[in-house]
Image: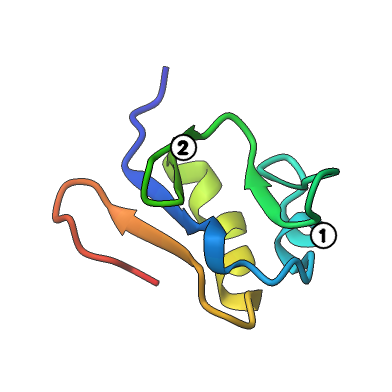
């Protein structure tokens, strides 16, 4: 299994449900049937309203594109080693 170098952090509470992430990376992002907001497939949800998912290097580019497309900047990618937010 490949090392998971990055972490997606999604501020779901502030998502506006535009759907750009789900169009760009449908294997990672889906829109909820309940409220229309984006959900990270397979993520861990925390009490602060965030979703977290560790991803492999090969999945970085697709998820960075999804984060770049988010009009309200609620998708972040963190380098797990340095703890720095890339986006």
Could you tell me residue 85's position as x and y percent?
28, 66
Residue 72 to residue 79: above or below: below
Q: Position of residue 53 (x, y in %)?
A: 45, 39
Q: In this view, does 42 lie above or below 37?
A: above
Identity of the residue drawn at 72% across and 57% down: 37
- Mark 2 or 1: in front is 2
The quadrant of the image that shows the C terminus is: bottom left
Instruction: Name the secondary structure under disc 2.
Output: strand
Q: Which residue is drawn at 40% across and 25% down?
A: 2
Tag count = 2
Which is nearer the eye, 28 or 35?
Answer: 35
Q: To which residue does mark 2 refer?
A: 45
Residue farthest to the bottom? 71
Q: Quadrant of the N terminus?
A: top left
Left or right placement of residue 38 versus residue 50 in this view: right
Residue at the limit of the structure toward the left, as seen here? 82
Q: Is residue 20 above or below residue 27?
A: below
Q: Residues within 10 Å of mark 1 (few under 14, many from 20)?
A: few
Q: Which residue is drawn at 58% across and 80% down?
A: 72
Q: Look at the image and tell me whether residue 12 can be seen.
A: yes
Q: Nearer the viewer, residue 30 or 85?
A: 30
Is 78 on the left or on the right of 76, as rendered?
left
Residue 6 % position (x, y): 35, 47
**Residue 64 is at least partly visible in this image:** no
Residue 46 percent across, percent down from the top left: 39, 40
Q: Residue at x 49, y 52 (%)?
A: 60
Give the structural element (helix, strand or loop) at label 1.
Answer: helix
Q: How is the image coloured?
A: rainbow
Which of the 4 quarters of the picture holds residue 20?
bottom right
Q: State the mark number for residue 23.
A: 1
Residue toward you, 25 or 44: 44
Q: Which of marks 2 and 1 is nearer the N terminus?
A: 1
């Amino acid at each position: 299994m490949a090392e998971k170098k990055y972490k997606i952090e999604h501020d779901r509470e502030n998502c506006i449900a535009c759907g750009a992430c789900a169009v760009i990376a449908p294997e990672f992002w889906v829109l909820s049937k309940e409220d229309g907001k984006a959900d990270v497939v397979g993520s861990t949800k925390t009490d602060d309203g965030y979703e977290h998912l560790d991803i492999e290097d090969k999945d970085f580019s697709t998820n960075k594109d999804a984060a770049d497309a988010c009009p309200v900047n609620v998708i972040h990618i963190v380098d797990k080693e340095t703890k720095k937010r890339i986006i």
